[in-house]
Amino acid sequence: MLCTQPYISCRACPKSQPCLPASTGVIKVYSEDNTSRAVEVPSDITARDICQLFILKNHCIDDHSWTLFEQIPHLSIERTIEDHESVMEVQSGWGMDSHCCLYFRKNYAKYEFFKKPLDFFPEHMVSISSETNGIMNHSQLIQTFLSSSSCPEIHGFLHAKEHGRKSWKKFYFVLRRSGLYFSNKGTSKVG
């Protein structure tokens, strides 16, 4: 027998044993009005599963814009947890004394990256790799990137904090298939 609940991952169980979820943990999730709810969930639950659970529990309309956010106050960061990410892994990365928390709320731009990719990859930030020999225009390159395993170089300036320093510094970064690289020497792509 297999479990059929959409938000709990279960293993196949013999008929003589009840179907039990994998190991569980408790997460606390805040809503838009700052009320919170603690729920016991399997250790392998994803952000999308949590959203589905809260949509059902709160009787919300599932318009695919509900999102789980991670808030990290000591870094002044709030980020969207991607649908496929393990919520327990995200939570395990927090320190014991941190004031990090999860929020469940709408994000209407959640899938804009896939709907309007050219808005996220302006022409000046994308390099056509040598394998295309210049035969693709910018729009074709982005569509190929999103629909296959090919990967153009994406480059631009980002602010990063060096280890042991308190201030942020502007660096030129290049994202390649092999990793993320930065340059201390302006817009050099040597890495």
Image (cartoon, grey):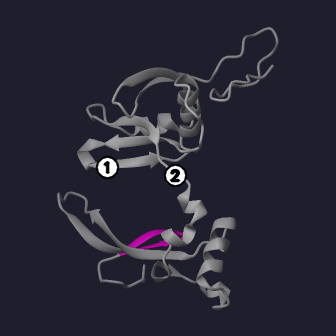
Visible residue check, residue 177: no
The secondary structure type at the circle numbered 2 is loop
Residue 128 place in picture, x, y as percent: 57, 84
Q: Nearer the viewer, residue 160 or 116?
A: 116
For image coordinates 36% across by 84% down, the residue present is 187
Residue 33 disc label: none
Which quarter of the image is occupied by the N terminus? Answer: top right
Q: Quadrant of residue 56?
A: top right
Circle count: 2
Which label sits on residue 77?
1
Give the dominant element type of the magenta stretch: helix, strand or loop. Answer: strand
Task: Give, as a three-letter code, the residue at label 1.
Answer: Ile
The residue tagged 2 is 110
Residue at 45 percent across and 47 percent down: it is 80
Give the quadrant of residue 94: top left
Q: Give the range drawn in magenta.
A: 173-182
Residue 104's place in the image compared with 183, above or below, is above
